[in-house]
Amino acid sequence: MEVRLMTETQMPIHVIGLGVNEHANLDASAQAALASLSEQDIVLGSPRQHDTIAAYFHKAQRCDLPKLKQLEGDFATWQTQGVTQVVVLASGDPLYYGIGAWLMRNFSPENLMFYPNVSSIQVACHRLGLSLQDVNVVSLHGRPLSSLRRHLQSNSTLVLLTDQYSQPKHIAQECVQAGLGQSEITVCEALGYEQEKVRSFVAQTLVKTEVECDPLNVIVVKTSPQTSLYPSSVGIPDASFITDKGDGKGMITKREVRLAILSYMNIEQGDTVWDIGAGCGGVSVEMAYWHPRSHIIAIEHHPERLACLAANQDRFGVIQNLSIVAGRAPDVLVDLLSQHNGQNTIPNKVFIGGSDGELNALMTQVWNRLPAGGSLMVSAVTEDTKFQVMQFAQQRDKVQDADEQSLQVSIAKGERLAGQRLFRPNLPVTLHHFKKHFEEHMTKTINKESAQ
């Protein structure tokens, strides 16, 4: 994600966590921040949040918190109007799935002061006697409901921050769809308020029951020991993917080859990865599934495969960190080398699984744009593509700008024929992995050759 600091905004911004109470319990420093405000200053928050601080006097203007896109411009406007300080009201801990992260991305840290408080996550855990380190916190607030799916494995405890699209019945439906219908769903409603309730349901029962819950809630899910549709270890079965041929037999990198690719690619937190010729999405979906803090960009032009790719993106809940680009490489790569939806799209790792006859141009273009330490992995099945990759490898040897690893994966799967067991071989796949040298490595190599 691109980081921008709005250095033109110099006013102090106080971000105050309100805790989990009908009436906020603020410490002395937060109270002092409110008391220091003048009549032209601003207090931002929802109507409910403003009500929680009614007992704390301040002179500032009370404003409802707008959408973040609007808020960005509002700060600059306020500064020109003579506003000297802004208070942003936040629920609980502002830097834990709160507005604090957005503010840190957009403003200089020197202008930000944070006043944390007890969060609804902490309170829900204490109501149920759960240790926070033993649960997995997932925010669905402002996020697609399907993003829950990557977390729905057996025998896990999830604490969910919700919105109007992720209410208890929606969560129950996701559990049932995952094959975890016996999961326990506990709804912690209106925590800290007089009408607080904590109620537990079985997912498969809740789906069929009309239950009204306070929209202000935290949901705790204890998933059942049933077998989940969603994997908990790498190597998603081919048949789990939606493909253009059905039963995992379409344009998809097969499980055993995919495992080798995942291992050699070695995706790390913060990587931006291109999957060129993504087909139905076996590689890109699995990379995105296991690496939620990396940005995976899947590039495909075939309409039917694109439809399958989008369906698999939704099926496995990799909505937030998998971007689908419809187009033919290398032409479409030009646009990707700029910014796309606010995210950095310049890759440090690339996998080419399909080239549609453009492999030479693709490898050259990608290699020239990869940063030092970046890597390129290429899959080849036909003799023509193997030859082109070998030529590329020879070029890397000539200029000595890469470390290369290559392997050939030959898989034979057991089947039954006329009551007898046999192994039917798949076409062997050749994989080449190139890691780009750092400049100092290349300089040392050149100097060594010159000395000889």
Image: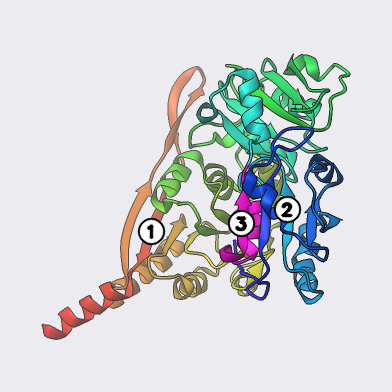
The magenta region covers: 99-116
Q: Residues within 10 Å of mark 1 (few under 14, many from 20)?
A: many
Side (left or right) of 42 relative to 224: right
For mark 2, give the secondary structure. helix
Residue type at numbered disc 1 = His
Q: Nearer the viewer, mark 1 or mark 3?
A: 3
Give whichever of discs 2 and 1 has the lower sequence position.
2
Is there a contact, CB below 8 Å, between mark 1 and mark 3?
A: no
What residue is disc 3 on? 113
In the image, residue 369 lies at what x, y percent? 48, 74
Q: How far apart are marks 3 and 2 (CA)?
A: 12 Å
Residue type at numbered disc 3 = Met
Comparing 105 with 426, the one in front is 105
What residue is disc 2 on? 34
For mark 1, give the secondary structure. strand
* Helix, strand or loop: magenta stretch: helix
Is there a contact, CB below 8 Å, between mark 3 and mark 2?
A: no
The residue shown at (49%, 61%) is 350
